[in-house]
Image: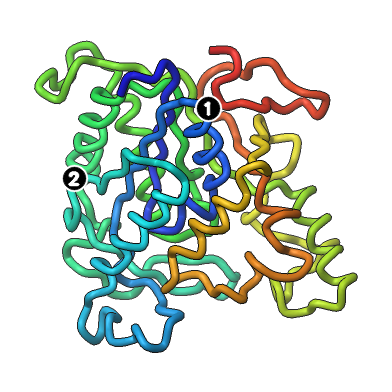
């Protein structure tokens, strides 16, 4: 990779990247920056939303992972990303699955596959990513917060692996067979703006839509899924690339309904999904806009 500025994203399953940072990825590719995606599992345990593909489910033919591999390839074509990899190679780690806690967030399933990412040896998984970090040499890394956004065990594990690998990759004496040491200058955690979410919920309810984000009160407790605005560090405006993001989302056909909230009503992508927010976990915040947020993850570098 020869681009002067390089972004590395670490995600748990195919589709997470397009939902969270699809617009940012497309924008940076268009600007000539390097974008590398590492996906930790193939999403074998995902819920299949296409009835004619129900036979691919884990409890049937167990072919969803291979299918989602193709979905991810198609999504990356839409975003223009040419460097996308599976952690340790395709099939190294399996989707761990999840269940819902009574409090409304995800937790680990009662039973997991022996090769589930949740069961991965942290050092082994981190070393796979150290190799990528030392090869790509990104200035910026993006992954989840310690809760994985909503508690999914694979999101939490991806956070742990990414944070540990970034630390190990910079150690001058650590496993030089994995490449020349490299320190990632800035690490961001993905975030959903609380203010923006409340604003959107009000618009949704005002339109008469009670189904989208059912049960969420725009003036009530939104739980750990959102980040207070005073904890945000960056807002990337990818609105010029929203069509590419929507096309990438549509490519994940088994996971995202084409008539769902990403594509319809007050929550449609053109109004909401083109702006992507981040918390700064490592590094110094660079120059900011009028709202006190960076407009570029490479700000200050």
Residue that badge 2 annotates: 88
Q: Tell me if 131 is positioned left or right of 252 in this view.
A: left
The residue positioned 13% from the left and 18% from the top of the image is 176
Q: Is residue 156 visible?
A: no
Picture coordinates of residue 146, whole percent (x, y): 48, 45
Q: Is residue 289 above or below residue 100?
A: above
Q: Tell me if 109 is positioned left or right of 285 in this view.
A: left
The residue positioned 44% from the left and 71% from the top of the image is 253
Viewer-side residue, 204 vs 154: 204
Viewer-side residue, 110 vs 180: 180
Describe the colour scheme in one phrase: rainbow
Q: Secondary structure at mark 1?
A: loop
Picture coordinates of residue 33, whole percent (x, y): 46, 26
Q: Secondary structure at mark 2?
A: loop
Q: Quadrant of the N terminus?
A: top left
Q: Nearer the viewer, mark 2 or mark 1?
A: 1
Q: Toward which corner of the image does residue 260 lie, by quadrant?
A: bottom right
Picture coordinates of residue 74, whole percent (x, y): 37, 57
Picture coordinates of residue 296, whole percent (x, y): 61, 26
Viewer-side residue, 247 vs 44: 247
Determine the CA span between mark 2 and mark 1: 29 Å
Q: Tell me if 85 is positioned left or right of 261 in this view.
A: left
The residue positioned 56% from the left and 36% from the top of the image is 27
Q: What is the number of the mark on residue 31? A: 1
- Decide: few, some or many residues near mark 2? Use Cα within 10 Å; few <14, some 14-19, many ≥20: many
């Amino acid at each position: 990779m020869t681009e002067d500025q390089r972004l590395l994203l670490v995600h748990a399953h195919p589709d997470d990247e397009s939902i969270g940072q699809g617009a940012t990825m497309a924008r940076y590719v268009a600007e000539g920056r390097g974008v590398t995606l590492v996906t930790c599992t193939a999403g074998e345990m995902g819920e299949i939303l296409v009835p004619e593909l129900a036979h691919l489910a884990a409890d049937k033919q167990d072919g969803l992972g291979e299918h989602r591999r193709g979905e991810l390839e198609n999504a990356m074509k839409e975003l223009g990303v040419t460097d996308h990899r599976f952690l340790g190679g395709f099939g190294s780690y399996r989707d761990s699955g999840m269940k819902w806690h009574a409090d409304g967030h995800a937790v680990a399933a009662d039973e997991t596959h022996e090769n589930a990412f949740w069961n991965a040896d942290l050092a082994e998984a981190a070393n796979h990513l150290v190799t990528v970090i030392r090869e790509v040499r990104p200035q910026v890394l993006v992954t989840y917060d310690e809760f994985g956004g909503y508690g999914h065990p694979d999101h939490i594990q991806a956070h742990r692996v990414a944070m540990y690998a970034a630390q190990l990759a910079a150690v001058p004496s650590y496993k030089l067979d994995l490449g020349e040491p490299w320190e990632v200058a800035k690490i961001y955690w993905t975030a959903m703006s609380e203010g923006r979410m409340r604003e959107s919920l009000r618009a949704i309810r005002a339109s008469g839509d009670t189904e989208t984000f059912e049960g969420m009160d725009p003036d009530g407790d939104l739980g750990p899924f959102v980040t207070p605005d005073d904890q945000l560090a960056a807002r990337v405006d990818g609105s010029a690339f929203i069509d590419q993001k929507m096309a990438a989302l549509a490519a994940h056909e088994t996971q995202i309904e084409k008539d769902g909230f990403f594509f319809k009503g007050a929550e449609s992508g053109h109004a909401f999904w083109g702006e992507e927010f981040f918390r700064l976990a490592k590094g110094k915040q660079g120059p900011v806009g009028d709202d006190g947020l960076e407009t570029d993850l490479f700000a200050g570098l």
